[in-house]
Image (cartoon, grey):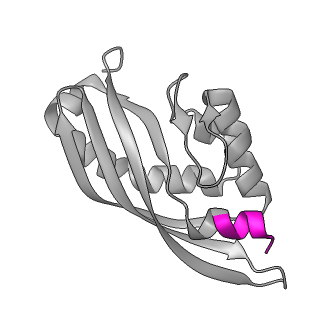
Amino acid sequence: MGLGMKTFAYSLILTIAATVGGQAWAEEAQSAIMAGAPVFVETYNASDGAALAAFYTEDAALLPPGGARVNGREAIAAFWQGAMDSGLVINSLTPTEIMQSGDQAVDVGTISLSAPDGSGGMVELSAKYTVMWKQDSECV
């Protein structure tokens, strides 16, 4: 595994902005976030960066460790497609703490990954993540 992917995989801590529907937000933001985690993993593992980027707002940002800020849905699609094409697999995404205030919430959790080891095998990794959610008042 190259140093760049190894650094990325070992220290994957991302802050991202995303949206969740208005009604779900008002009634059960925590449930919606918890239910969305496996859908995000499934979409990632389908290897379609554009489909994964649809989870993000147009003005969302990723803050990958050791890398430049990734701004906007199109750049986020390219970022995730690169990770997918490298062979990185997301095994699980587990929200462990969700803090909500007004129309925003912060989701802190853990991510389990499998990354190519450079010898034809995979290495199992675990990291932390942070997601900032904002209510999308146009969703119902």
Q: Residue furthest right?
A: 119
Task: Tell me the magenta residue range.
Answer: 1-7
Q: Residue furthest top?
A: 138
Q: Is residue 102 above or below residue 106?
A: above
The image quadrant of residue 116 is bottom right
Q: Quadrant of the C terminus?
A: top left
The image quadrant of residue 121 is bottom right
Residue 32 vs residue 38: left or right?
left
**Towards the viewer: 10 or 56:** 10
User: Horizontal and vertical percent for residue 98?
Assistant: 24, 50
Q: Is residue 17 above or below residue 48?
A: above
Q: Quadrant of the N terminus?
A: bottom right
The residue positioned 61% from the left and 30% from the top of the image is 71
Residue 24 vs residue 91: left or right?
left
Q: Is residue 2 magenta?
A: yes
Residue 113 vs residue 133: left or right?
right
The residue positioned 73% from the left and 47% from the top of the image is 81
Residue 125 vs residue 104: left or right?
right
**Towards the viewer: 119 or 42:** 119
User: Horizontal and vertical percent for residue 25?
Assistant: 23, 31
Q: Main secondary structure of the magenta part?
A: helix
Q: Is residue 14 magenta?
A: no
Can residue 95 be seen in this snapshot?
yes
Can residue 89 be seen in this snapshot?
no
What number of labels is visible? 0
The residue positioned 40% from the left and 45% from the top of the image is 131
The residue positioned 79% from the left and 56% from the top of the image is 85
**Towards the viewer: 68 or 27:** 68
User: Horizontal and vertical percent for residue 108?
Assistant: 33, 55
